[in-house]
Image: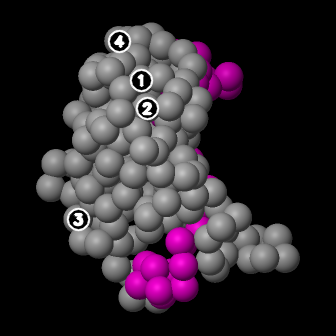
Amino acid sequence: MSKPVQDADTGAGPFTVRRYYIDIARPKLPATELMSQIQAHPEKFSPDLLADFAKEKGAAHHLQEGDEYHIKILGPWNGSVRVTEVAAQHFELCTLEGHPEAGTIRFSLRQLPEKADTLRFEIRSRARSRDGLVAFAYSTLGVGKQVQEQTWVTFCQRVAEASGGEPLGPVQVDTTEEDESGKQHEHHERR
């Protein structure tokens, strides 16, 4: 039986929006073909030692709404996600009950309008910790944050590699926190 969705409203602490993105010049693959590869094999883009994507529900090498993955992330950060949206240039996952975070994560590829022949691959999550203990371990102690960040930075780098194009600089990492009142605090890094 499928676990219920654990959306951001059920979590604790601030809502955190994280963006990891890389711009790729002169990719050899069109965006739709590259996204098709990512959707078929997300496990190939994540670092083996840090995160393991295991499909629990749905056909192998194919992504569709309702599919479920169990993601084992180094440390106590294991959890399941469900595919909620699939399109030619993006897909979205939501966390399921028991995942350390409550929210969604979206993987997308798009042509940059101001730069011909340049794609942007972006991973954008909007989530909050499942509960106060997870929030404390993640934010205050920093446990999990580095592993999660390294997982998605590596994912971006591997997408750039698979594209056959040239990355235009390092992976960019943006974090925006919103407290319950909606007030935002931003943070930007290059990896």
Residue 12 position, x and y percent, is 62, 77
- Give left or right: position of 110 versus 155: right
Q: Which residues are magenta?
A: 109-138
Q: Which residue is mark 2?
A: 67
Q: Give the amino acid at mark 3.
A: Leu
Asked if marks 1 and 3 touch (Cβ < 8 Å), the reply is: no
Query: How many C-alpha atoms fall within 10 Å of the one at disc 4: few (<14), some, or many (≥20)?
Result: few
* Secondary structure at numbered mark 4: loop
Measured Cα–Cα span from mark 1 to mark 3: 24 Å
Residue 104 position, x and y percent, is 57, 50
Position of the C terminus by quadrant: bottom left
Residue 8 position, x and y percent, is 65, 61
Q: Give the amino acid at mark 2.
A: Asp
Q: Nearer the viewer, mark 3 or mark 2?
A: 2
* Secondary structure at numbered mark 2: loop
Give residue 28's mark.
Answer: 4
State how many labels appear: 4
Q: Residue at x 55, y 52 (%)?
A: 4
Q: Nearer the viewer, mark 1 or mark 2?
A: 2
Measured Cα–Cα span from mark 2 to mark 4: 29 Å
Asked if marks 4 and 1 touch (Cβ < 8 Å), the reply is: no
Q: Residue at x 41, y 11 (%)?
A: 33
Q: Give the amino acid at mark 1.
A: Leu
Q: Residue at x 54, y 79 (%)?
A: 131
- Please say whether residue 34 is visible from this viewpoint: no
Asked if marks 1 and 2 touch (Cβ < 8 Å), the reply is: yes
Measured Cα–Cα span from mark 4 to mark 3: 33 Å
Q: Nearer the viewer, residue 92 or 113?
A: 92
Mark 2 or mark 3, which is nearer the start of the sequence? 2
* Secondary structure at numbered mark 1: loop
